[in-house]
Image (cartoon, rainbow, N blue to C red):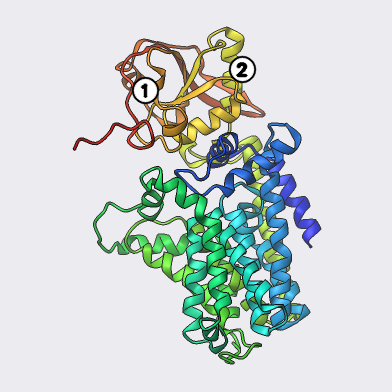
Amino acid sequence: MIAGSLIVRLAASALIGPGFDEAYYHEFSRRLAWSYFDHPPLVAFVAGFGRWLTGAWAPLTLRLGAVLVFTFALPGFYLLAGRMYGRDAARLALLLPHATPYFLVGAGAFVIPDNALAAAWIWALVVTQRLREHTIPRTGGFILLGALAGIALLAKYHAVLLPASLVVASTYDRELRRWWLDLRLYLALLVAAASFAPVIVWNAGNGWISFAEQFGKGTSGEFRLRFDLIGQAIGGQIGYLTPWVAVALYIGAFRRRALGGGKPGGDRWLVAFFLTPVIAFTLVGLTRGILPHWTMPGYIAAFALAAGGFAWSRRTRRYTTAAVAVNLALVAVVLVQGATGLIRLAPNADPTLDPAGWRETIRELERSGELREGDLIFAHKWFTAGELAWADRGRHELVLLGDDPHMYAWWAPETVYRGRGGVFITQRRYGIDPVKKLERRFVRVERLPIDTVRAGSRLVRMAAWRVEGLVNPHPPPYGPHAPLESP
């Protein structure tokens, strides 16, 4: 099952260009740091692994680290359910993630911080179960648990819900409650904190900007309930899991639960690791918009619980196999859409257009002599900047002309490039008017004859302007080049 999954995920990785966040994370790997504005540093290593190994710029090498990290996670699903419920449940727990789009190709094949988060999370649950059973050395087990928590924190800030789930579980599980009297638990917490120290050091030197950004994301600064958003929060989770899998997970997770409390063989402790992330972020969805994948770590525990709730019967096998088949069909549709644009969608509603047209536009501008050695490439948003940097293969410096520059506030602030010129490139689907954006910042702005380019079998509408003499650069709102606040 793992080998078949690996083939599918490698194929998906190779056949579609990088999404805008993946291309942006690849820039992390070219500028290694203790941490970043958007995330802790581990995503940079996941994004850069394939290129460092092969030297090639290709979708497969970009995603190779993500594919391998999630492949390492998969035996954890099998072992967790196997320790708790037996081999048949282990098989079902391994099969269930392959029935969900998010885990098969989201965390399983594409570069996101959740690749390493999911791997560390599932193995932390395996180690926790072994510690509860007293089947591994206590000191070594707690140190390993702390290291896994540290890896999770280096992957994504949402990993704070891993120890939070432990706190919740210990309120009703006697075995976990005893841990608080064991000094080795505090050794584990110390290991996790030491692992996370580079992120703290980086944030301390940058005004705690990453913490402020991530923990305040999506909020206007005032608290008010938004009941219109809760449906979106719940519906997004169902979409990432597919409705038929989501229903099965909730039914299976609470079906014939072992009510053993603190008994080493009981499984109630795992419910906290399921519901704490799901409930926490769903409640956040009452106050602001959330992204569906924020809740997904909780469903890692749900796979094991559901596998224990259902018998490995012919009906279960058929249902799960059908769910996997439907999921593979959905992946195939996305791959075909990315390659051909067969389904006619509005450009703004088609995410498979994210990677399309950038490299072809750059090549055309180089052939025409409009993009020359020493020119800058300008972008209007951090996500288009990532796509342009990936398409350009690092041959030109890239500058972001935007008010929310993310890491480009550190890498390429406008103020450093006063007097320089080059080419501004965008996809026309964004509907911006670059002339209004550019004419106040440059001495000369000239529209270039780029309209439609062919990316594989797709036609993509692009636009480019020649710009000369940056005279009115905007300072970034944060980062080392931001203006000092007045006393």
Q: Position of residue 84 (x, y in %)?
A: 69, 82
Residue type, mark 2 in image = Arg
Q: Secondary structure at mark 1?
A: helix
Q: Which residue is mark 2?
A: 363
Q: Which residue is mark 1?
A: 415
- Between the C-alphas of marks 1 and 2, the distance is 28 Å
The residue closer to the viewer here, 368 or 65, is: 65
Quadrant location, the N terminus: bottom right
Quadrant location, the C terminus: top left
* 102 shown above or below 244: above
Residue 242 in sight from this viewpoint = no
In the picture, measured across the screen, residue 373 lies left or right of residue 318, that is left
Q: Badge 1, how many Cα within 10 Å: few under 14, some, many 20+?
A: some
State which mark lies toward you, 1 or 2.
1
The residue closer to the viewer here, 116 or 481, is: 481
Q: Secondary structure at mark 2?
A: helix
In the picture, measured across the screen, residue 251 lies left or right of residue 78, that is left
Residue type, mark 1 in image = Thr
* Residue at position x 72%, y 51% in the image: 68
* Residue at position x 74%, y 75% in the image: 90
Q: Position of residue 323 (x, y in %)?
A: 67, 65
* Residue at position x 51%, y 75% in the image: 166
Residue 228 in sight from this viewpoint = yes
Q: Position of residue 82 (x, y in %)?
A: 73, 77
The residue closer to the viewer here, 319 or 183, is: 183
Q: Badge 2, how many Cα within 10 Å: few under 14, some, many 20+?
A: some
Dot 1 or dot 2, earlier in sequence: 2
